[in-house]
Amino acid sequence: MSVQPEEQQRPLSHDAPVLPRGSQTQATATVAKLESMVEKYLAKNFRVTDTATAFLDAFFEPIPSEDISEIVDIVKKETFILVKVTKGEKAQEKAFYEPFASLANKILCAYRGPMKIHSYWTTRANNPVKSLKDENIADIRPDGACVVGDIRTLLELRERIKLFSDELNNFALNNLGKEPKDPLPEVFNLPKFIEATLLFAANQAQTLERKPAVKDICTQIHDRMATLCENPDKASLCEALDFLVQVAKAGTGDWKPLENEGDDYKQLTHRINNVMEKMWERQPFDSADALYSADIDKAITRLVRGKVKTLSRAQLENMRTLWWLRIGTPIEMKPTSSVKHRQEGSAQICRYMQTVLKTQLCRKFVFGLLICNHHLRMFYCDRSGLIASAEWINLKTDHDKFIRLIVNLSALDPCHLGWDQNMRLCSKANDKEKPELIFSRPTDPDVTLDNYGSSAYDTNWAIFVPEADIARVGRWYLTVKPISVDRSEVMVGRATLIWAVKALNHVTDFTNEGPVHEPGYEKGRVRILKHTWSLYGDPTESTYHGVDAMANVARITSSVKAGFSDRSGICVEDSTRSLRYHIPTISASWNHGIIESSLRTRTGTLAKETSVETSNTTGKAKGKQTDKGMGMDDNLDNRNDNDNDEGKDTGDKGGQVTGKGKATDKTTRSKGQGSSSHPDQRVPVFDESRNPKDDAGKVFTSRILTYTLIESYGWPIHFFASLEELVRTMRDAIQGHRNLYFGRGVLHRDISEGNILISPGSIDKLRPGPNVDHTTYGCLIDLDHAKQSLQRIKYDPRGLDFDYESRKFIGSKLSNYAGLGSKLDDIWRRCQGDDGETYTLARQFPRIEKSRSDFDK
């Protein structure tokens, strides 16, 4: 919502402040811009781990060898050969798409382990991936993806339909010209067909469990399942189809009962197939694609009218819509393992991973897969950069590694695949008389497009903020208005997200207690919540601000470091070091993709990134440290001591924008942080052991997720309503800067238009004085780049002696400027004895005084 300068268009209410949102009129993102962005982030923030086993051990759970053997027996070894190419023939990239997705989904169907499947694999290379409005996504299309949703019952029903249809066709061929038999011979596997239909119907009903119409359907299905499977006939199959239609009708609201009387087995099979496909293809976003819905409805209408025509798999696949919001792991495929394809593919997969981070505000990290012919490389990206496995997985022979990867990416707890367990989607129940807030994890099976807003700025979240660093105790907050969520696209940096929030319920363990709709929360106080990936070891904003309120400086309620439950169930700090489970890595060369030659130029030992950051970090790498290493490019300096953060042009204060529009670091990381040899005891001294160097002398920069709650809010200064308000706001901001420096020893270091707010109310409540008639005051915000020191140079310019020669020389240069004689000494002292600066300021002094005189008039 844009806010105009006029007072009537920005009502100043503490309960419902008008907060400007980030720019929604940015130019449409192009692939070229995306490529440039990814290159900037990864040029100095790319690392590799030696073996595929080390990568798997760090991030994924093991799969017992007996389970892997069982899966291989079910799937068949020959299935792992995706494409067979004869000698002299070139493999086509598109030939790998469907075989890979089919193999991955067969593995999921064969898996019988304890992990719960929540995602499936699909290919959509020729179809655009959809996103919410105003997200400005570049037109890129991953070749495949692991997508949220469990389709095992769908795959089983498809298989049973195929087998039953084949049996029907064989039966028809064998009985041409003969009297048709009814019922069918017992050799037909009708019971399993009925069972698969009912299980799929029950599975779909579970995704609609919040709808009153399906509360009893699951129970009815399971009650009838045994009877219908024990007495399989056409009537039993009709009843199974009726259950399927009931669920579909409850889910979409626009279904009409199908007339089954008179249908033969072939017609019933066609109808089950098409109802099944329609139900799945419209999940989870049943109202998302009107064109698709219209096409599929026409197909069903033809079936109902008796014109039996089964849609082909290809037609259904083309109709399907894939959303960036649902992608867990993107895939890029190349037909060969050439150096060119490996480099191009690694660059492409990273662009997909960046887009996942951009569109999913609740993602902390993302995995990606690159497949070159039958070789697979794994990628991982968080806010500290990119990790890749130097070793490739051979799909034809490394069955154990491939199966472990596929199962974990589809079944591991979503919080260990990058989704933030501290964030829940919030939507309102469709009850006008008693509206209630519904909170869901983005990976829940019943989440639909309706749970999201029309854009990222219209989507509400519940966010858990701990009471102390890495604590399970804390409070859930509901976002009521986004301030800036554009920086989610940042691959390496702070990636700051800002919301206006109101408090919900207090909990003692966020892992077991979610947000709760408490009546009357709307009357609660509005606060500002900042979600930032800060450099590890940097002081928080509350450290700089202090406990007491400070006039003209934003009041910070708390600034705490987040935690998460690792795979052992232990609550550890939410830092990129912990998220990486201390995987041993070494820096490598990146230039529009992985420089493969740099991985073979020389060998070295991978440095295990042991953490001395905090005793609370308990995550451990399960893989053994190896002596095999990756060669590095000696000419490429990958040290990352800097906070290579984003610029401020879109609302985030991640870096200083230079004249060329590039972000530059403003946080000097050195052992001496003050201007004195005595370090400030309130600020942790930078310790290189927090970011240990590997054998190549490169540094991995760790970041930690920080939540900052701020009581002050307002409008950026460019929304001033009058000249008086503008000047008053500037004056107050200067006073706030002074209060920070002299009161707390803090230098702000990031004064900008976006960091000076016009806040509603009067500052007199913090600074008692005479009554004033204005209703706003200036407030300085954002201490992300501040520095603090108790020691400072004490320098009194009044003790300086303006020597005769210097005064005479400068006076002769300024002979044309009347009235400076009596003021030249003051100007020189203000410039602390610098002759050059004295001359420059003295030349501008008459113009400054004239401007002040004109303003007074």
Image (cartoon, rainbow, N blue to C red):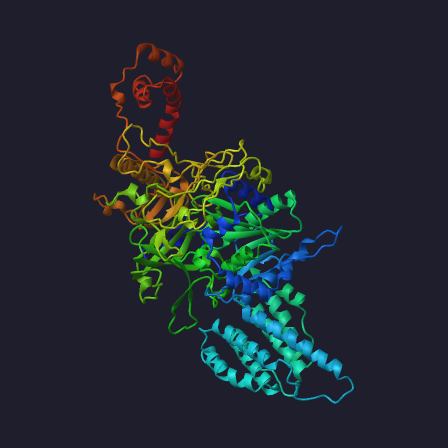
Q: Is residue 106 above or below residue 580?
A: below
Residue 305 visible in the displayed image: no
Rendered-image quadrant of the N terminus: bottom left
Looking at the image, residue 194 lies above or below residue 76: below
Coordinates of residue 440 in the picture (x, y in percent): 42, 64
Q: Is residue 674 above or below residue 380?
A: above
Q: Position of residue 294 (x, y in %)?
A: 62, 70
Question: Dividing the image into 4 quarters, which one contains the C terminus?
Answer: top left
Taking the spot 31% from the left edge, 58% from the top edge, the residue there is: 475
**Image x and y of residue 396, in percent:** 62, 55
The residue at 46%/57% (across/down) is: 61
Work out whether residue 152 or residue 246 is closer to the camera in this orientation and state it: 152
Task: Measuring from the top left, give residue 293's x and y in whole percent.
Answer: 60, 69
Q: Quadrant of residue 571?
A: bottom left
- Foreground residue, 87 or 700? 87
**Res 493 quadrant in image:** top left
Q: Residue 575: in sight, yes or no?
A: yes
Quick one: 386 or 696, which is closer to the camera?
696
Residue farthest toward the right in the current orientation of the protein: 177
**Outermost residue toward the top in this view:** 805
Left or right: residue 186 compared with residue 438: right
Count of residue discs: 0
